[in-house]
Image (cartoon, rainbow, N blue to C red):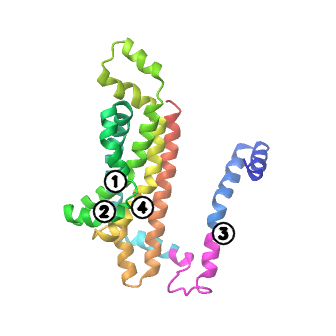
Amino acid sequence: MSYADLQLGALEETLPAPLQRVVWFVFEWIPLVIVAGFWEFASGTFVPSTVLSPPSEVAFVTWELLVAGDIIPHLQVSLFRVAAGLVLSISIGVLLGVGMARVKPVENFFEVFLALIYPIPKSALVPLAILWLGTGTETSVLIVFLACLLPIVLNSYNAAQTVDQNLIWSAQMMGMPSWQIPLKVVIPATIPSILTGIRQAIPIAFIALVSAELIASNQGVGFEILRYSQVGAYTEMFAVLVLISAIAFFAVRGYEWGERKVVRWT
């Protein structure tokens, strides 16, 4: 723990709860305010404002895009793709990770495959996905699924390997069939690690989504970013980037809030 953390912790102990939240809020957002201030100063000073729009102008255009509603259909398409890819990766990743940890043939079969696809940038698979599925939602969902699969599999696998053997023996002594043990014993015991893997996968999902939509879509935020950049509408391009960044940020924060509620009971 750093000296700054110790000082902040000591300060927190002397403040009432409402002021503690204010202090943490200020410390959390100060870096963003500093970056925005430097960005505002640099635009038109070091970098032409036609290339690097100031954040005040970007904020105004972001509001205009939302009020006009032009960006809303694209946001809806992108969020559907993220959700679909995440749901698929969670459903398959948890079962695959637990299966690899508890059944040796499953581990032997999938270990090499996962090791081979891990170092490949998922955006590099977009042309192949276009060949198979065409341009559209299916390709974007596939890229999101592949990008999110590994962190969920690894967290599920590592957690399932460390499950207390006494839990499994107790279930067996109570007459639970072997095929039910992974579903009723192992997976519930690994929930905290599975939730961690999902939290890691959420920002990866947005990265993969935009990468796929830049190449293989005529809808979505990635398509809008590319379209605005091609016509030189850089302020609008920055506005879409800000929107998707904010959505991803609040998606992670909302998930962390829900995760704390769930883990409290696990």
**Which tag is nearer the camera, tag 3 or tag 2?**
2
Give the residues in magenta. 34-58
The local secondary structure at tag 3 comes to helix
Instruction: Report if the CB atoms under discs 3 and 2 are less than 8 Å apart.
Output: no
Classify 122 as above or below 52. above
**Amino acid type, callout 2:** Leu
Residue occupying the point 42% across, 15% down: 170
Disc 3 crowd, CA 10 A, few/some/many (<14, 14-19, 20+): few
Question: Alpha carbon of mark 1 to alpha carbon of mark 3: how far?
Answer: 36 Å
The local secondary structure at tag 1 comes to helix
Question: Alpha carbon of mark 3 to alpha carbon of mark 4: how far?
Answer: 24 Å
Disc 4 crowd, CA 10 A, few/some/many (<14, 14-19, 20+): many
Asked whether 219 or 60 is in front, the reply is 219
**Which tag is nearer the camera, tag 4 or tag 1?**
1
In primary-sequence order, the first of circles 3 and 4 is 3
Question: Alpha carbon of mark 2 to alpha carbon of mark 1: how far?
Answer: 10 Å
Residue occupying the point 43% across, 47% down: 151
The local secondary structure at tag 4 comes to helix
